[in-house]
Amino acid sequence: MATTSPLVSLLLTDLYQLTMAQAYWKSGRGEREAVFQMFFRRHPFDGGFTVACGLHSLIDTLTQATFSESDVAYLATLTGYDGQPLFETAFLETLRNFQLNCHIDAIPEGTVVFPFEPLVRVTGPLLQAQLLETIILNIINFQTLIATKAARICLAAQGEPVIEFGLRRAQGPDGGLSASRAAYVGGCVATSNVFAGKVYGIPVRGTHAHSWVMAFDDEREAFQTYAEVMPNNCVFLVDTYDTLEGVRHAIEIGRWLRERGHEMVGIRLDSGDLAYLSIEARKLLDAAGFPDAVIVASNDLDETIISSLKQQGACINVWGVGTKLVTGYDQPTLGGVYKLTALRHADTDDWRDCLKLSEQAIKISTPGIHQVRRFSLDGEPIADAIYDIRLGISTPCVIIDPLDPTRRKRIPAEATSEDLLVPIFRGGNCVYTPPPLETVRHRAQSGLARLSPGLKRFVNPHIYPVGLEQSLYDLKMQLILKARNGDHSAIRP
């Protein structure tokens, strides 16, 4: 397969990453070892789960990304507010010779994840780790958002196939390509995006547009001609004029196809009262001897509309979802952040824990070098512990909600566990073999299947227990209290 990320320049970043990088370099801090962690604070769409996605695209980007000669030449043209060059020549030479030298750990794609858990952990020279912030957030935030939306839509479809139809409404070519991939991870069975089919091996599906019907003198002629040219791909769009009359015309051409050894796949409804029209269309198709003909529905669908249609008894077999899937329509971003959480002392091998304070409890970062341990009983996840790899994890393990210290959970001794973050890069070299996309998709489906039904509700879902392991929580509280008293010595370099 081709690379999953067409943009591989490290100029895909915010300017302040580069100005900070020069400042780290100039002040002699650039080579100090640092730890940054990427996480999100709230589930998207007011849901109870999130599906991690985008890691493989990130790997492709980081294994190829450099500062090219033209990149460095462009940076040399930038000026400060005084009109003088923004970047020193020696610093630009450092960028020209950039070679990734970080350790990167991440949670594999398709894993169900929860707020405050690090999806990506970067350990390495401060200058380099800082420069990776924007590109990590750009890739992981978007694909995780869309994979989660797709998972919700597929849950609403209750096992019926969902096809991603969103390329024409996506946020540009790269947004369309990334969305198709993420939607497939989240559970969609196919895409209309032919380029995504080529790049990722995703099955491609499609019908025809209203313009096809309008290009003929009448609807029946349009269907007939399409059947003659594409006898093995006949899903007729029946709502250009009178929908139920369109179904009757499709049935006529379906009989014509059957006489010639082919079978009409089905019809598509793209407007109107989808519940009523699908029920009436089903009656017509069944009565005419086409019980296996599918009814595909489209028209700005999402999980809420699909759930409503199913409650109304709609006879829809396949769901084509576009705009509200690939754009994350009701929430434009995941909101993931990337925070410095530990820094080596300049003159020792000891780590200095870093903490960001805020007047909002949700925005106070957690210090340390984190790992996530998932505990399960009888195959069902029961809780996740975020712990510091230096402090380890206590036995028995007690986790504390980072936003409410009164919410604590003691993990049963008989629970099984696994750590979620795995090595991806070591010293800048990729040590992880990304599994096939089908394997990633299967991980997402099996992970969702193991969640309790309450976590998958669309309204007021159950809250999965995620907390800081006791010793990490105690460390965080100690640093918060010191900072509130004006002692920042353990917080910043």
Image (tube, grey):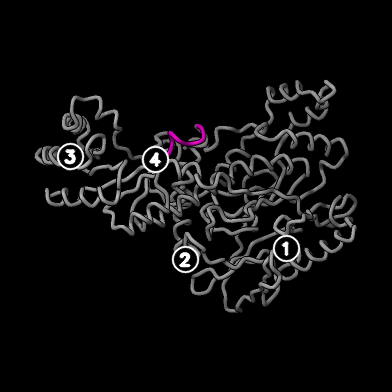
Mark 4 vs mark 2: in front: 4
Q: Nearer the viewer, residue 273 or 154?
A: 273
Measured in 3D between alpha carbons, the distance from the residue under mark 4 to the one under mark 2, in whole angstroms, is 28 Å
Q: Earlier in the sequence, mark 1 or mark 3?
A: 3
Question: Dot 3: what SS?
Answer: helix
Residue tagged 2? 450
Q: Which residues are magenta?
A: 166-172
Task: Using residue 193 as the reference point, say whether residue 375 is left or right of it.
Answer: right
Q: Earlier in the sequence, mark 2 or mark 3?
A: 3
Q: Quadrant of residue 230?
A: top left
Q: Can residue 211 be found in the magenta stretch?
A: no
Figure check: 223 above or below 466: above
Q: Are marks 2 and 3 in contact (CB under 8 Å)?
A: no
Q: Amino acid at mark 2?
A: Arg
Q: Residue furthest toward the bottom? A: 413
Q: Amino acid at mark 1?
A: Asp
Residue tagged 1? 388
Q: Nearer the viewer, residue 60 or 476?
A: 476
Q: Residues within 10 Å of mark 1 (few under 14, many from 20)?
A: many
Task: Using residue 181 as the reference point, say whether residue 228 is left or right of it.
Answer: left
Q: Earlier in the sequence, mark 1 or mark 2?
A: 1
Disc number at residue 165?
A: 4
Q: Amino acid at mark 4?
A: Phe
Q: Earlier in the sequence, mark 3 or mark 4?
A: 4
Figure check: 262 above or below 73: below
Measured in 3D between alpha carbons, the distance from the residue under mark 4 to the one under mark 1, in whole angstroms, is 43 Å
Mark 1 vs mark 2: in front: 2
Q: Amino acid at mark 3?
A: Glu
Measured in 3D between alpha carbons, the distance from the residue under mark 2 to the one under mark 3, in whole angstroms, is 45 Å
Q: Residue 322 placed where, x, y %?
A: 41, 41
Mark 2 vs mark 3: in front: 3
Disc number at residue 245?
A: 3
